[in-house]
Image: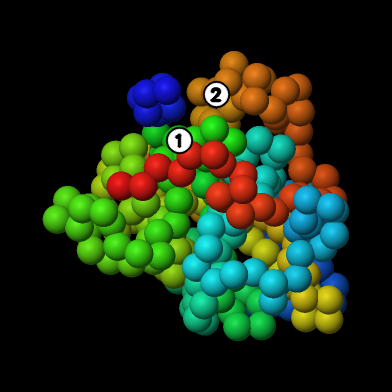
Amino acid sequence: MDRRDFIDGSAKTVCGTTVGLIAGMQAPFAFAADAKPKTYASALLVNAQGDPIKAASLKPRTNYIFHYPFESTPVFLLDLGKPVPGKSLQAADKSSYTWPGGVGKGKSLVAFSAICAHKLVYPTPQLSFISFRAGKSLDPTKHGAEENLIHCCADHSQYDPAQGAQVLRGPAPQPLCAVLLKHDPKTDTLTAYATLGGELFDEFFKKYEAKLSIEVGSKAKNAVAAKTTLKELEQFCRNTIKC
Ligand code: FES
């Protein structure tokens, strides 16, 4: 399938509701006044057997995928292997927000929508043009020589997950929308509970309505409820494009 079959549209919407904390969970960061996370139903990250994922079991600098806040909207989970501080960012409509940084014991776990902010390319079970790269681009003269970026090969937007998925290169008009996680230090489990930044779900559903109905079925727009399954991208997707 040609990559152009996947791409079109642009980035606009910003999340809207201030969020509270779940009792007993670790508060990673005090949100600044301009921050406006949008809460959704909390979803515990589980493995294919339905057992809670332990944060300590995650491999550093490895692509993991789960779906949140809807059954068909993919999210990258990354352990960057080092503490990640918060950062002030701006969405395409000039709204500012403060991304809270990494969570977990090492403050190294981050999550971002895997829907590219340029033309909404996203990972499917068949193909992925967008992923985290622990190594350098295959052609650094064209695509930049830095490591540890999320790279979309459709038009070479590059996002820095250590800076709230800020855009470093390429045509994307805003950072990837952040997905906020809470880490429970007692159980070492992770729960997704909100988004922060420029959401693109309305545009995504509009663009891919027919495709999603085939890939995911009638539940594509359903909110994730209670649990969401985490997989390595290499297990989720048969063909991860490198560039
Ligand atoms: S869709 Fe154009 S850079 Fe990702």
Q: Residue at x 67, y 64 (%)?
A: 181
Q: Position of residue 85 (x, y in %)?
A: 49, 78
Marked residue nearer the N-terminal end (2 or 1): 1
- Is 149 rendered above or below residue 211? below
Under tag 2, what secondary structure? loop
Q: Secondary structure at mark 1?
A: loop
Seen in the image, is 82 located left or right of residue 231? Answer: left
For residue 140, above or below residue 213: below
Type of residue at label 1? Leu
Counting the numbered discs, the total is 2
Residue behind mark 2: 208
Q: In this view of the protein, which residue sits in the foreground, 237 or 122?
A: 237
Badge 2 vs badge 1, beta-carbon distance below 8 Å = yes
Label 1: how many Cα within 10 Å (few below 14, some 14–19, many 20+): many
> Does the Cβ of the disc 1 residue fall within 8 Å of ligand 1?
yes
Q: Report the amino acid beneath label 2.
A: Tyr
Residue carrying label 1: 120
The mark found on residue 148 in the picture is none
Question: Within the displayed image, which quadrant is ligand 1 positioned in?
Answer: top left
Apparent side of residue 86 relative to residue 137 in the rendered image (left or right)? right
On the rendered image, what quadrant is the N terminus found in? top left
Residue 3 in view in this figure: yes
